[in-house]
Amino acid sequence: MSGTPQVDPPKPPAPAPGGGLTRRALLVGVGAAGGAGAMFAAMGALGLAPQERREDYTPPRVSDFHLTGRVAADVVVLGAGVAGLTAAYELGKAGYRCTVLEARERTGGRSLTLRGGDRVSELSGETQTARFGEGVYFNAGPGRIAQWMVTLDYCRELGVPIETFVNNNASAYVYNHGMAAPVRARTARADVYGYVAELLAKATHAGALNRRLTADDRERLIDFLRRFGDIGPELTYEGSDRRGFQTYPAVAAGVPLQGPEPLAEVLAAGIGRAVTADFGFEQAMPMFQPVGGMDAIARALAARVGEDRIRTGVRVTRITGLPDGVEIAYQGPDGPGTLRADYCVAALPPHILAKIPGNLGPEITAALATPTPVAAGKIGLEYGRRWWELEDRVYGGITETDLDITHIWYPSYGYHAPRGLLVGYYNTEENAELYGALSHRDRLSRALTQGKKIHGEKYRSEVVSGVSVHWERQPHIQGGWVRWPSYTGAFELLQRPAGRVHFAGDWLTHLIAWQAGAMESARRAVTAVHRDALSRTPPARSDASQGKGT
């Protein structure tokens, strides 16, 4: 998916013994309120941050992954999602003959991009047809890539062009229950930073930190807090133009927003969501997306694997481990068949694999059934004009809300085009289950009613078309991602092969719900396959079926 759900903000540090506050706890508190940048600035104010670049620093190198040596062996890959396609691609580069079996009619798995004319069906039997205009698309699954992820290395290697994804936009909104009206993210951030700075500065000035800070420390910290929170000489936050303007400066001076609201009202409104939304290391700007739709990555992988080696509409019905390989029984468009190979990489969701009969053993089956599928859903709303740019001056980014839609995503492409598409909700768990139980028409109606609370009547009246996808109701997938009770036991067991069957997927990493997790897991699996194959001379079977069913 497009990423893991937003996490709860860090808890404030506990006081040190004796009632004081250690420097470390102080920095953690500043970081919790203002992020890594604020904490680094505070470190600088206290003289704790490095001032110069180390001469022996070596920047990160471009990712390099290849299998040394070539092996003429057959591998059947179960699933043509990102993990399965990556495994087949990397094995193919090392000389393996791969056949990919995919139960759905398209490749990519959860990396699903919908365009005009595309159809999407659910387990309920309802089928929607996207009626988007030319150049408009909806990333129903993954939507963003962090710059440190291996996904970008594959984009480079496969020739997939990328562009910036605006993950954090000060012009987007925050709206929660109890608020009279939505506020801009910049306003919410300014008020939270301002009041935090005021409280900490006054505590420092009153001597509450004297046992832990020297006089110089206190002076540096207060100087930093004045700038961090834009507090006045009396160490009081009274607002500033950081909050935004009623009328922006031009020939005449601008008119700043009135405010801020009292601290109690800021806290009651819960607008800290705007401050903590991008704290996760996987959410930090800048982020990226493939030009033209996220499925460009899966399509490029499939092209490199070879369309002739990928069979869609083929459902696996049994997995049988053999002493010298594996046998896969399947139900395809032309009826049942079997496929034998030297190795198998099973890249299906674990809860789907757990239901496929075979002889891998009860321990493996129980391990596969251990993680819990997480409900997740999105809706794409197309509009005939880009009013969020024209009237709200919002170019990309995400509005945060505690309404059941959870987020509204503004497109990071097609700026100033005649029309465009918003992600009208991206929700998970209880909220996703609520929407998933509805028909598409009712999902659309509810999403528009909720979004109207933020953007007004135009949000509902000007919508042209919409498509919703709920992953727990997608055939052969049945979940947005999974959640493990722990990263021991079953998780560790499935890192190892069951005979000649190896497992792969984002669900076997600490990057669950990210394409990078699927790719990293695939690389681990193909490395294990290759290591085993090289240890066997000659390969275990020389009469392989070479991808043809019998």
Image (cartoon, helix red, strand yellow):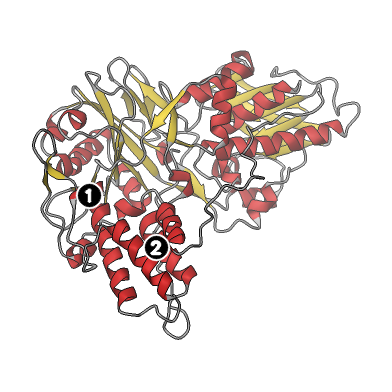
Q: Please state which of residues 408 and 316 is positioned toward the viewer in this rendering.
A: 408
Helix, strand or loop at label 2? It is helix
Q: Position of residue 406 (x, y in %)?
A: 29, 47
Residue on which the image places disc 1: 242
Q: Position of residue 389 (x, y in %)?
A: 21, 30
Q: Position of residue 314 (x, y in %)?
A: 57, 24
Q: Please tell me which residue is depicted at 64% across the width and 54% down the height of the picture.
A: 490
The amino acid type, in three-letter code, at marker 2 is Val
Q: Quadrant of the C terminus?
A: top right
Q: Quadrant of the N terminus?
A: top left
Q: Please state which of residues 200 and 402 is positioned toward the viewer in this rendering.
A: 200
Q: Please tell me how crowded label 1 is: few (under 14), some (14-19), or many (20+) other residues with Cα within 10 Å.
A: some
Q: Please tell me which residue is depicted at 64% across the width and 17% down the height of the picture.
A: 309
Q: Please tell me which residue is depicted at 21% across the width and 61% down the height of the picture.
A: 266
Which quadrant holds residue 251? Answer: top left
Q: Please state which of residues 124 and 252 is positioned toward the viewer in this rendering.
A: 252
Contact? badges 1 and 2 (CB < 8 Å):
no
The first of marks 1 and 2 along the sequence is 2
Residue most extreme to the right = 537
Q: Please tell me which residue is depicted at 64% across the width and 48% down the height of the picture.
A: 365
- 428 on left or right of 545: left
Helix, strand or loop at label 1? It is helix
Q: Residue 231 has which mark?
A: none
The amino acid type, in three-letter code, at marker 1 is Arg
Q: Please tell me how crowded label 2 is: few (under 14), some (14-19), or many (20+) other residues with Cα within 10 Å.
A: many
Q: Is residue 504 above or below residue 234?
A: above
Q: Residue 30 has which mark?
A: 2
Q: Please state which of residues 91 and 195 is positioned toward the viewer in this rendering.
A: 195
Query: Could one spot residue 318 in this view of the protein?
Result: yes
